[in-house]
């Protein structure tokens, strides 16, 4: 039995196989409509989520399976003091696979240690969000035609942005990747990402605060939200929350084939006027995420053949 807790849990070859399966599902979803007949996914979301939870649920429903779970800690037995370990043992009696989001880093790893069903980390605090990484890789490969030789700009909250941390980890395994890290000084990428991932692997990168100056270099611009829920000091959040606003004027500085991605939800960091730009791919990214999660569920349940 395999879990999916970290993007590095799969080799590059396994990533490629997963992405190939997601592509096959996207091209012929009806062929996979009954692959999970009789199977159940438990979505255990201790932290608010719309896209990720619904994406997992839609993925299982589209495979012919069914869904159970909860969407907040308050609506589960955790409000009575139940531990993550006990919850997963109970859920293992009901479901075939589990997707868990938790505000504390490492909670899905604790669950996996006690689980008798595959556990998917659907986001743990500011740590990792590997299924979003699968979504991001699938979107980039589908729309750019490759995962190699790209300059990736990551903009916004790079300190707490778990999607950013997971994506950097995953992309360092592809040739010719260069990162441009765009953030205020207070929200720079954590030192363990810089030192243990980028520096150790000799991945070219630079850290800047000005978005306009680097727009012409980018093949991908990955925007992120300044996350209010990660701040202990509201004054600091208010000071930083509108650090970056991507608008039509900034898009004029970009390559004609640059893609704009965003894990969503957005607040002010992408102006609505950008939505109509053909380079804005963040809503298509949501759709592709469902296909990617269908492929992930099938793979972890051993149903990919």
Image: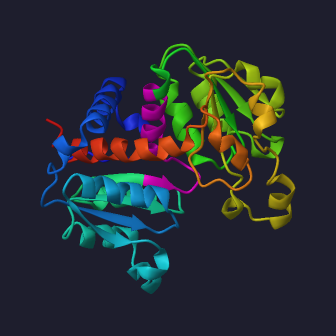
Residue 6 in view here? no
Quadrant for residue 244, please give it: top right
Going 70% across and 49% down the picture, which residue do you hit? 272
Residue at image x 17%, y 41%? 31
User: Which quadrant holds residue 97?
Assistant: bottom left
Q: Nearer the viewer, residue 147 or 99?
A: 147
* Residue 141 vs residue 102, the one in the foreground: 141
- In the image, residue 178 lies at what x, y percent? 62, 19
- Residue 158 location (% of width, % of height): 68, 42
Q: Position of residue 19 (x, y in %)?
A: 34, 31
Nearer-the-camera pick, 277 or 8: 277
Tell me, yes or no, if residue 263 can be seen here: yes
Part of the protein shown in magenta: 122-142
Q: Is residue 14 above or below residue 91?
A: above
Residue 118 lies left or right of residue 288; in this view the side is left
* Residue at 42% over, 34% down: 8
Instruction: Please say whether residue 139 is one of the residues in the magenta stretch.
Output: yes
């Amino acid at each position: 039995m395999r879990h999916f807790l970290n993007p590095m849990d799969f080799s590059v070859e396994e990533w490629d196989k997963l992405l190939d399966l997601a592509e096959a599902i996207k091209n012929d979803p009806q062929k996979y409509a009954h692959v999970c007949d009789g199977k159940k996914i438990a979505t255990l979301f201790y932290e608010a989520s719309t896209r990720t939870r619904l994406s997992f649920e839609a993925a299982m429903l589209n495979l012919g399976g069914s869904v159970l779970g909860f969407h907040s800690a308050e609506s589960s037995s955790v409000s009575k003091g139940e531990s993550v370990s006990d919850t997963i043992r109970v859920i293992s009696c009901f479901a075939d696979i589990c997707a868990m989001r938790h505000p504390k880093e490492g909670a899905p790893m604790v669950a996996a240690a006690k689980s008798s069903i595959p556990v998917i980390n659907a986001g743990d605090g500011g740590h990792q969000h590997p299924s979003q990484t699968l979504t991001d890789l699938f979107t980039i490969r589908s729309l750019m035609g490759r995962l190699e030789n790209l300059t990736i700009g990551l903009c916004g909250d790079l300190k707490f942005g778990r999607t950013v941390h997971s994506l950097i980890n995953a992309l360092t395994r592809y040739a010719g990747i260069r990162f441009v890290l765009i953030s205020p000084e207070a929200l720079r990428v954590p030192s363990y990402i810089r030192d243990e991932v980028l520096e150790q692997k000799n991945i070219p990168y630079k850290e800047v605060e000005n978005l306009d100056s680097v727009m012409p270099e980018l093949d991908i611009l990955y925007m992120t939200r300044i996350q209010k829920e990660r701040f202990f000091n509201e004054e600091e959040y208010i000071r930083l929350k509108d650090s970056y606003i991507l608008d039509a004027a900034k898009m004029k500085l970009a390559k004609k084939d640059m893609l704009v991605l965003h894990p969503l939800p957005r607040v002010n960091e992408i102006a609505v006027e950008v939505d109509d730009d053909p380079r804005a791919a963040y809503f298509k990214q949501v759709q592709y995420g469902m296909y990617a999660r269908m492929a992930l569920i099938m793979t972890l349940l051993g149903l990919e053949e």
